[in-house]
Amino acid sequence: MISCQDFFDILNKYDLSFFTGIPDSTFKEWMKFLVDKDEVVLKNLIACNECEAVALAAGYHLATNKVGVVYMQNSGLGKTVNPLTSLCDPDVFSIPVLLMIGWRGEPGKVDAPQHKKMGKITLPLLETLQIPYWIMEPDLKSIEKKTKAVIDYFKTKKSPYAFIVRKNLFQEYNLEKKEKDDYSLSREEAISIIMQNLNNDEIIVSSTGYVSREVFEFRNSRKKDHYKSFYNIGSMGCASSIGLSIALQKPNTRVIVFDGDGAAIMQMGAFTTIGKYSPPNYIHIIFDNNAHESTGGQPTNSDKIDFVRIALACSYNSARIIKNKSDLIKAVPEIKEQKGPSLVVIKIEKKTRPDLKRPEKTPKDLKNDLMKYLNN
Ligand SMILES: Cc1ncc(C[n+]2csc(CCOP(=O)(O)OP(=O)(O)O)c2C)c(N)n1
């Protein structure tokens, strides 16, 4: 293992002090360091998605002639294919970027099903993109040697290079900045309040990370009717669009999307499609903890935006914000009946049970059960 400070010292020595991206739990200690040291010794821009992060690094290069570092989980590599090939590629603008890619689903290691394919193709995909890479070794001398070589590569080739990061590369980092939580309702409690009060004929489409795991556990503890759920365990940001399309096809069924603030921001353009096609049977709930909690609690930009006004401006029928448990309990009967599309932002604290399990049914079985229900 290496210390975050030691790694940063090497990068900084070579003038690599601009960071942006979307977090990954593979390097959550490193993410803590970046958040802690932002505006102190480095710059860390919280991006909305990995595609944008590459563009931010490109702009940084244009303005400074320095190279930006873009961090991401390998699931986000797919989102970067376009700017890597059509913006940074040497056949186009030739813009150097250092990619730091967390390797989920590494062949031979146990991981969740949504990481399997990307884990297998991460290195071949980089090869196809003609982006050279190095699987980081937990050894500072090798890191320093490689970083120096990469800087030379950037100078001569002016094109992207990737560091591949395996789990447990970084030692634990203790945050110096104090974190404050303004809310006291947990996501699991909010999910339970809502689900207990539904008519039980609604379809719930839940987003990537802890939210789907919590819905799965809630259903497990009750009637186990997983067939009324779509657990969008991968494809971050897409739950709202999957739900939209189901709602449009099944106008007599209420569809409720359980989103995260990070996921909603990642694909915020979806708000415009939801507003345009306006299914009255569609409810969009965002559990807003101002964090990517599922990957370690790194901040999102939700504290600086107003989801309610965005939704209304995109032609949602209604939008509201709920900040505590008693207001949620009061609002649920109305929320579940009101004409959609409606947005409900529920402000929650960062808190997740440490023993939260992953769905034990396979994605295919879950999908087949839902489809049987929807198509009979
Ligand atoms: C394209 C993509 N980038 C990154 C990830 C890694 N990832 C999984 S869950 C998650 C955080 C989701 O944050 P949010 O939607 O706010 O929900 P929370 O975890 O706070 O419940 C991230 C970054 C991913 N799955 N896909």
Image (spheres, grey):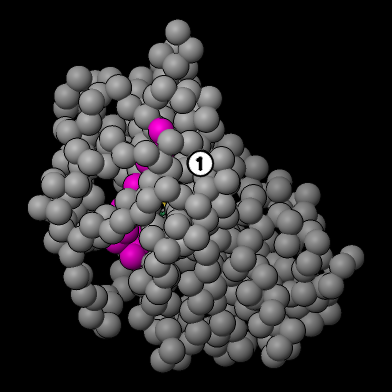
| Residue 297 horizontal/vertical position (percent) | 32, 63
Tell whether circle 1 marks a residue whose Cβ is less than 8 angstroms from ligand 1: no
Q: Is residue 100 above or below residue 122?
A: below
Is residue 59 among what the camera can see?
yes
| Residue 324 horizontal/vertical position (percent) | 15, 58
Label 1: few (<14), some or many (≥20) within 10 Å?
many
**The quadrant where residue 214 appears:** top left
- Assign the magenta stretch its main secondary structure: strand
Is residue 233 among what the camera can see?
no
Q: Is residue 268 above or below residue 33?
A: above
**The quadrant where residue 77 appears:** bottom right
> Of 62 and 205, which appears nearest the observer?
205
Placement of the N terminus among the 4 image quadrants:
bottom left
**The quadrant where residue 175 appears:** bottom left
| Residue 45 horizontal/vertical position (percent) | 51, 77
Over which residues does the magenta segment extend?
281-292
Residue plotted at (48% across, 12% down): 375
Instruction: Report the amino acid beneath label 1.
Output: Ser
| Residue 325 in magenta stretch | no
Q: Which residue is mark 1?
A: 278
Placement of the C terminus among the 4 image quadrants:
top left
SS at badge 1: loop
| Residue 199 horizontal/vertical position (percent) | 23, 26
Residue plotted at (23% across, 57% down): 322
Residue plotted at (56% across, 40% down): 277
| Residue 290 in magenta stretch | yes
Left or right of 218 in this view: 49: right
